[in-house]
Image (cartoon, rainbow, N blue to C red):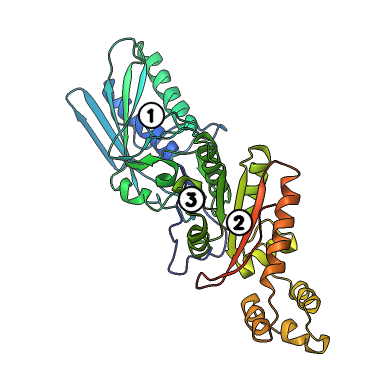
Amino acid sequence: MVTGKAEIDATGRRPAGPLRRGWTTGACAAAATKAALTALLGGDFPDPVTITLPKGETPAFALATEKVGEGFAEAGIVKDAGDDPDVTHGAMIMVRVTPAAPGTGIIFRAGDGVGTVTRAGLPIPPGEPAINPVPRAMITGVVEELCAAHAVPADYEIAISVPGGAALAEKTWNPRLGIVGGLSILGTTGVVHPFSCAAWIHSIHRGIDVARAAGLDHVLGATGSTSEAAAQRIHALPEIALLDMGDFAGGLLKYLRAHPVAKLTIAGGFAKLTKLAQGALDLHSGRSQVDMGFLLDLAKAAGLDPAESNRILDANTAQEVLETMRESGIHLAPEVARLARETALETLRGAPVAVEVIVTARDGEVLARTGFQ
């Protein structure tokens, strides 16, 4: 249940200047529900339609489509994620509202492009549409408020669809989490904050929850696809054991501290895991850097002549250091792996999690591998 990693421009870089906020799929679905139910109850489609978000904000949403048919009303809103590189930016969030049998209350349905939960460990139980708790609460509030105003029971079926959502979902964590058929309807505040780390870290947490609920005793957190594939050649873990850690080692380790799994493999490239070895928990290039002095100390301990220190200090990248030291017969990766594991164990603070670290080259070669400790 994750926001995907689409690009905002050809480079994928964060745009310069102030960033524009956007709205979650959950907020769009709540607004579309309000518009459709208003029309079904005999009114005109409100356009724009205004809703109240959990923190009291009252955004207005323009309708992209509206339709009234025999026993139903439908409205659609194009999701605007602001300046966030969100895979669902520009997606149409459609809601069809139909009367339900008396006394049934509000029933949620997954329409085309919205997934269904199939595994335990998520906030929504298996068999239910992948519509998260806060969007459900927002939609329920909208329905109950309108029904009270019209003095009718709040017995309606809410079917949410996202045309093309099944293809978009392949760019998210949903397949690994056991959410099949499409996207999740997400949001806790209704607001998308540009380039926020929260959605990614939230998805790591849900991945751990699913692995624990499935009874797994070993999970893998990798910085990228190359290191994940290298570790999988060793361990061949089931897909739900694969946690898309990315740069967020801290988000992974701190959650495991409170929600342990018996064994954790951390796999990553030399530069990323050097930063972890240095003690950094956020491995993004914009938030932590490789310390050449740190690598120099490791190289000296491994036998580098101090007179050759500038070979490291003048290097442009960690990769350059790795290659030049290997040419001299000095292998830095094993010590980086060992120190990265120390950082991980320190962050876990005694939680019952044994940690292994695998350092990989750009081509997937395993440069170093610690045992579990």
Q: CA distance from mark 1 to mark 3?
A: 27 Å
For badge 2, the amino acid type reads Ile
Side of 276 relative to 199 (left or right)? right
Front-most of residues 232 and 135: 232
Cα distance in 3D space between marks 3 and 2: 13 Å
| Res. 237 mark | 3
User: Mark 3, residues whose alpha carbon is within 10 Å: few (<14), some, or many (≥20)?
Assistant: some
Q: Position of residue 299 (x, y in %)?
A: 76, 78
Q: Is residue 141 above or below residue 341?
A: above
| Percent of width and height locating residue 344 | 70, 53
Q: Is residue 98 visible?
A: yes
In what element is the residue under mark 1? loop
User: Is residue 321 positioned above or below 131 on the image?
Assistant: below
Q: Is residue 213 above or below residue 280?
A: above
Please state which amino acid type lies under the numbered disc 3: Leu
Front label number (1 vs 2): 2
**Residue under circle 1?**
128
Q: Quadrant of residue 96?
A: top left
Residue beneath disc 2: 266
Q: Earlier in the sequence, mark 1 or mark 2?
A: 1
Residue at point 46%, 28% (across, down): 138
- Residue 107 lies left or right of residue 331; in this view the side is left
Quadrant of res 311: bottom right
